[in-house]
Protein backbone atom coordinates (compact mmCIF):
# COMPACT_ATOMS: atom_id res chain seq x y z
CA UNK A 1 0.00 0.00 0.00
CA UNK A 2 2.78 2.41 0.91
CA UNK A 3 4.59 1.54 -2.33
CA UNK A 4 1.52 2.39 -4.41
CA UNK A 5 1.11 5.70 -2.56
CA UNK A 6 4.75 6.56 -3.21
CA UNK A 7 4.28 5.66 -6.87
CA UNK A 8 1.28 7.99 -7.12
CA UNK A 9 3.24 10.87 -5.55
CA UNK A 10 6.18 10.34 -7.91
CA UNK A 11 3.82 9.96 -10.89
CA UNK A 12 2.04 13.23 -10.16
CA UNK A 13 5.40 15.01 -9.99
CA UNK A 14 6.42 13.43 -13.31
CA UNK A 15 3.17 14.41 -15.02
CA UNK A 16 3.54 17.99 -13.84
CA UNK A 17 7.14 17.99 -15.12
CA UNK A 18 6.05 16.58 -18.50
CA UNK A 19 3.34 19.22 -18.84
CA UNK A 20 5.77 22.02 -17.98
CA UNK A 21 8.38 20.69 -20.42
CA UNK A 22 5.72 20.24 -23.09
CA UNK A 23 4.39 23.77 -22.61
CA UNK A 24 7.94 25.09 -23.03
CA UNK A 25 8.29 22.93 -26.17
CA UNK A 26 11.24 21.03 -24.71
CA UNK A 27 9.86 17.58 -25.50
CA UNK A 28 9.89 15.77 -28.78
CA UNK A 29 7.14 13.21 -29.13
CA UNK A 30 8.21 9.78 -30.32
CA UNK A 31 5.20 7.73 -31.32
CA UNK A 32 4.89 4.06 -30.51
CA UNK A 33 2.05 2.99 -32.77
CA UNK A 34 2.33 -0.78 -33.04
CA UNK A 35 0.38 -2.58 -30.33
CA UNK A 36 3.10 -5.25 -30.07
CA UNK A 37 5.74 -2.55 -29.54
CA UNK A 38 3.61 -0.96 -26.83
CA UNK A 39 3.11 -4.32 -25.15
CA UNK A 40 6.86 -5.01 -25.05
CA UNK A 41 7.63 -1.51 -23.83
CA UNK A 42 4.99 -1.77 -21.12
CA UNK A 43 6.25 -5.19 -20.01
CA UNK A 44 9.81 -3.95 -19.77
CA UNK A 45 8.95 -0.64 -18.10
CA UNK A 46 6.33 -1.91 -15.66
CA UNK A 47 7.52 -5.41 -14.81
CA UNK A 48 11.21 -5.89 -15.62
CA UNK A 49 12.80 -2.48 -14.97
CA UNK A 50 11.37 -1.99 -11.47
CA UNK A 51 12.60 -5.41 -10.33
CA UNK A 52 16.13 -5.08 -11.68
CA UNK A 53 16.67 -1.37 -11.08
CA UNK A 54 15.29 -1.40 -7.54
CA UNK A 55 17.41 -4.40 -6.63
CA UNK A 56 20.46 -2.44 -7.80
CA UNK A 57 19.64 1.10 -6.68
CA UNK A 58 17.70 0.54 -3.48
CA UNK A 59 18.97 -2.89 -2.50
CA UNK A 60 22.66 -2.45 -3.28
CA UNK A 61 23.39 1.28 -3.71
CA UNK A 62 21.03 2.68 -1.07
CA UNK A 63 21.75 -0.24 1.25
CA UNK A 64 25.49 0.33 0.97
CA UNK A 65 25.19 4.08 1.43
CA UNK A 66 22.83 3.54 4.37
CA UNK A 67 25.51 1.59 6.21
CA UNK A 68 27.85 4.60 6.05
CA UNK A 69 25.50 7.61 6.06
CA UNK A 70 22.29 8.75 7.66
CA UNK A 71 19.04 8.04 5.78
CA UNK A 72 18.72 11.51 4.23
CA UNK A 73 22.20 11.44 2.67
CA UNK A 74 21.77 7.84 1.48
CA UNK A 75 18.36 8.72 0.00
CA UNK A 76 19.57 11.78 -1.92
CA UNK A 77 22.80 10.13 -3.11
CA UNK A 78 21.12 6.94 -4.32
CA UNK A 79 18.37 8.95 -6.05
CA UNK A 80 21.00 11.12 -7.76
CA UNK A 81 22.94 8.10 -9.00
CA UNK A 82 19.67 6.54 -10.19
CA UNK A 83 18.71 9.72 -12.05
CA UNK A 84 22.10 10.10 -13.72
CA UNK A 85 21.83 6.71 -15.45
CA UNK A 86 18.53 7.73 -17.08
CA UNK A 87 18.05 9.99 -20.13
CA UNK A 88 18.86 13.67 -19.44
CA UNK A 89 15.31 14.90 -20.01
CA UNK A 90 13.97 12.59 -17.32
CA UNK A 91 16.57 13.31 -14.62
CA UNK A 92 14.33 15.52 -12.45
CA UNK A 93 11.22 13.29 -12.29
CA UNK A 94 13.36 10.14 -12.00
CA UNK A 95 15.27 11.75 -9.11
CA UNK A 96 11.94 12.45 -7.37
CA UNK A 97 10.85 8.87 -7.96
CA UNK A 98 14.19 7.66 -6.58
CA UNK A 99 13.69 9.73 -3.43
CA UNK A 100 10.17 8.31 -2.98
CA UNK A 101 11.44 4.77 -3.51
CA UNK A 102 14.29 5.19 -1.02
CA UNK A 103 12.03 6.75 1.63
CA UNK A 104 9.53 3.91 1.24
CA UNK A 105 12.31 1.32 1.37
CA UNK A 106 13.78 2.89 4.50
CA UNK A 107 10.36 2.75 6.16
CA UNK A 108 9.36 -0.76 5.11
CA UNK A 109 12.72 -2.54 4.79
CA UNK A 110 11.03 -4.62 2.05
CA UNK A 111 12.36 -4.34 -1.51
CA UNK A 112 8.91 -5.04 -2.97
CA UNK A 113 7.77 -1.60 -1.77
CA UNK A 114 10.16 0.49 -3.94
CA UNK A 115 9.55 -1.95 -6.79
CA UNK A 116 5.87 -1.04 -6.50
CA UNK A 117 6.72 2.68 -6.43
CA UNK A 118 8.74 2.22 -9.60
CA UNK A 119 6.12 0.09 -11.38
CA UNK A 120 3.29 2.53 -10.57
CA UNK A 121 5.46 5.45 -11.68
CA UNK A 122 6.42 3.81 -14.99
CA UNK A 123 2.84 2.72 -15.69
CA UNK A 124 1.48 6.20 -14.99
CA UNK A 125 4.13 7.96 -17.08
CA UNK A 126 3.67 5.56 -20.01
CA UNK A 127 -0.10 5.86 -19.84
CA UNK A 128 0.11 9.63 -19.63
CA UNK A 129 2.45 9.84 -22.59
CA UNK A 130 0.41 7.44 -24.72
CA UNK A 131 -2.98 8.97 -23.91
CA UNK A 132 -2.26 12.68 -23.49
CA UNK A 133 0.80 13.44 -25.56
CA UNK A 134 -0.06 11.54 -28.75
Image (cartoon, grey):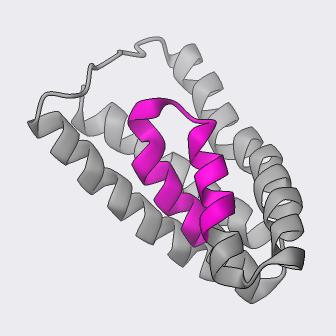
**Where residue 13 sits in the image (x, y, percent)?**
34, 61
Identify whether 57 is placed above or below 87.
below
Within the image, what quadrant is residue 69 found in?
bottom right
**Where residue 91 sits in the image (x, y, percent)?**
46, 43
Residue situated furthest left in the rendering: 23
**Where residue 74 sits in the image (x, y, percent)?**
71, 71
**Which residues are the magenta region?**
76-100
Please report the residue visible at 86 percent of the width from the left and 62 percent of the height from the top: 59
- 127 vs 110, left or right, is left
Please report the residue visible at 51 percent of the width from the left and 55 percent of the height from the top: 95
Is 48 part of what is drawn in magenta?
A: no
**Where residue 81 sits in the image (x, y, percent)?**
66, 49
Identify whether 102 is placed above or below 24.
below
Count of labels shown?
A: 0
Is 80 part of what is drawn in magenta?
A: yes
Within the image, what quadrant is residue 39 found in?
top right
Give the quarter of the figure containing the N terminus. Answer: bottom right
Please report the residue visible at 73 percent of the width from the left and 72 percent of the height from the top: 113
Please report the residue visible at 52 percent of the width from the left and 77 percent of the height from the top: 5
- 86 vs 11, left or right, is right
Give the quarter of the figure containing the C terminus. Answer: top left
Amino acid sequence: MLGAAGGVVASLAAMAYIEIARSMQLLSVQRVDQMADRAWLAALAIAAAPVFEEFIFRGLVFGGLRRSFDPAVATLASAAIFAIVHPPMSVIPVFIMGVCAAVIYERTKVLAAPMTVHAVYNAAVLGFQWNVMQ
